[in-house]
Each structure stands twice: as structure tokens, then as C-alpha cells.
Amino acid sequence: MIGRYRNPYLTVEWSRPPAGATCEPLTLITADDAVAGGWLYARGGEDTVVCLMHPRANFSRHYLVPGLVERGFAVFCENSRWLGNDSTLIHERALLDVAAGLKAMRERYDRVVLCGNSGGGSLFTFYLDQALAPEGERLVENAAGPLDLNRFEMPAADAMIYLAAHAGEGHFLLHSIDASVQDESDPVSADPALDPYDPANGFREPPEESRYAPEFLQRYRAAQRARIERIDAEARRRLERRRGAARRWRESGAPGDRREAIATRFLVVYRTDADPRSVDLSLDPSDRDYGSLWGRRPDWINYGPVGFARVVSPEAWLSTWSGLSSRAELVRTGARMTLSCLHVAYTADNAIHPSDAETIVSSLGSRDVERVTLRADHYGFPEEAGREPAAAALGDWLRRRG
């Protein structure tokens, strides 16, 4: 088995239900008439609720729920309108899903705390960047077209927690995309001089560990950026083709232009499991083991069907997965995150590395940042080293910040 987990669909879920809690399912109608789902866990009498959400992952049974409920906090788990599917995910619209959840929690609790786990960290920070913006200074458009966020109610939160959070999905992909791809239509095309899984460049199959020369890494990182730039340009070309057809349709009413204006030409992005840090543990050193988030043989997984941003619309690419164009990046949004916050890092994380954690903390505008490190992987395994201590750390911090 090259996968890291026996059942990857259960990695975020609890192993035991919250004792003595009720679960209230909520249907959230967003301000733009989409639907998000929520699950509120509580025993009754709580004055603080901790909110968890991810742009597309299922957080309905998040592993933090039992530990936080047992420590006297309500927990609200929300799934976005894009549950399980990021092919058309527009982060700017996902902010309206967050707003709907916060509005519902504001009506029930005195204190509302956001907990950004994994992709939830960049999502919630983007939300706060817009919610806390001066009047009239929110975004008015996104890659898909006009979207004036100044028109919507976006309730603020009282505090922020980062748990194994990354600095942005685009930031993650910028470091993991395979720079050696020469032809975007060919899943096996490769420039040998840039192939991270070519022994000539320092790769070794496990149990040996790879070692990359600084010169190769410098060229590789530059080529990763260049590939993102090329995909960005193609995404914009496809968008402009549709928009041009829409302009012609409005003028002529021709059926062909109407069809062209509607048709979405999806991007197929091959080979996105190629971060040298996955196989060279001397880079960005931590307690992690060999392999990537996906599994123990990234050199194989990189060529398979599993991976981030595999099939995406041009809008979703630019809004979510481009490390150069996405606005959901902490280096862009962190300055307005001035709330008191707790940052919890898992030191054996195969997805979030020490430099990523430093990027997050250094990007925040908050002057009140407390940090905790725990020796666990991205999903808090083993539980006794990650999940249980994480719940304890969050509970302690929330009580002290009462």
C-alpha cells in the first residue's frame, strides 16, 4: 500500500463521537442563494462556539469536536457549497458560505472563534481580510466576473485559531507542481533536466533518501513558477474567449456565440505531487517521514489520477489554485487578521512545513499570537500525540482568553 492512510476519506473524522452532545443540522442559505450545510454540536449552556470549515473537504464530523465539546465549547462544522469538488470552486463566493455560518452562530453565542484547519486557515483569513476591510474597500470582482462583497453582511469573529493550516492552496501547489512538464496535454512529458524523480538530479527510491543540489533546487523552483505562469496565461486566454463570445452574443444574438459564451473549457493539470521536500528530508527539516500527503511513493502518485487541481475551470484555477493569482493567500490577506490567535503546528506534517508555518505567522497583522507545536502528521495522527493534545491546547487557550 503506497497510500498513507487505510481509508483516506476518514482522515478528518473523529474516532469517537462527542459524549452527551446533541447535533443540530443546519441548512444555510447564502446571500447569493447558494446552500451550505452545517452541524452544530453542543451540550447546552455554552457561550463560545468554535467554527470549522474547509473550502471543499467534509468537516461535518471533524476530529476536534469531541475534545472541544467535552471541554465546554460548542462546535460548528460547516461544509461549503463545493463539498468534494473543487473543479469550479471560487474562493470569493465561498466567503459568502462562511458569512452565512457566522451569522447563524452570532445569533446563538456570545463569542465566535474561527478554527482554520488545513485549507480552512487560508479560507478564514481571506474571509477576515474582507470582513474587516474599511467600508467600501472590499473586493468587487473575481475571476468569474463581478461580485461586489460590499453589498453583503459579513459578520466578524472574536478570535482565530490555525491548526495545521497552510498559507493558501495556491501556495501549496506552487511548491508541489511538477516543473518538468513540457506539454500540458501529455501526462508523461518531461524535461529530464528538471525531473525531480530522475536519479541524475538526486532522486533515490526508498528506503534511500534523495538529495538535491542547491543549483537544481533553484532551477526547479523557478521552473515551477514558470509553469504556474503558463497555466495562468492559458486560463485567462480561455476566459477571454468566452467573454468575447458573450459580447458578440449581446450584439448579434447568434446561437453559436451563445454556446461559446457558456461552454467551459476545463484545464487538466497533470502531475502535482512533486515537492522535493517529500523525498529529501534535509530540506525544510521536521519530524515528518518520507513521502507526501498523498502517500509514501510520490514518484508514483505524481503520475496517477489522485492529486490537487487535477481538473478545474479557468476561474477556479485563478481563484483557488494559482499561487500567483489566487487572492486566498495569507501573504496577501494576513495583514488584516488582527484578532488574537493561536497557531498549532504538527511537526510531522507531510504537507505543511516549518517554512510554511513561519510564512503564516509572519504574515499576520495580529500582535497577539501564541504558538504550539505537536509531534503529529497533517491529520493529527497518532491521536495521542496530535488530536488529543490539540484539543487540550485549544481548550486551554480559549479559557485563558475567555
Image: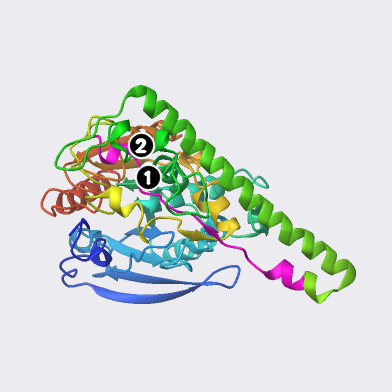
Q: Is residue 6 magenta?
A: no
Q: Residues within 10 Å of mark 2 (few under 14, many from 20)?
A: many
Residue furthest left in the image:
384
Q: 69 left or right of 136?
A: left
Please give the residue where the numbered disc 1 appears in the rendered image: 166
Say which amino acid is labelled 2.
Answer: Asp
Position of 262 compared to 51: left or right? Answer: right
| x and y, in percent, of residue 270 in the image | 45, 53
Q: Residue 110: x, y in percent?
A: 38, 58
| Residue farthest along the right direction in this orientation | 252
List the residue tagged with mark 2.
Answer: 356
Camera-side residue of 104 and 25 = 25
Q: Is residue 161 above or below residue 246?
A: above
Numbered-mark total: 2
Return the residue nearer the eye: 5 or 164: 5
Span shown in magenta: 258-280
Task: Indicate how the structure is coloured in the image.
Answer: rainbow
In this rendered view, identify the residue nearer to me: 394 or 309. Answer: 309
Q: Is residue 335 left or right of residue 26?
A: right
Q: Amino acid at mark 1?
A: His
Residue found 32% across the figure and 32% down from its top: 201
SS at circle 1: loop
Q: Residue at x 54, y 61 (%)?
A: 96
Q: Is residue 273 visible?
A: yes
In percent of the image, x 46 and y 34: which residue is there? Answer: 365
Q: Give the percent coordinates (x, y) of residue 363.
A: 44, 33
Residue 138 makes an appearance in the image: no
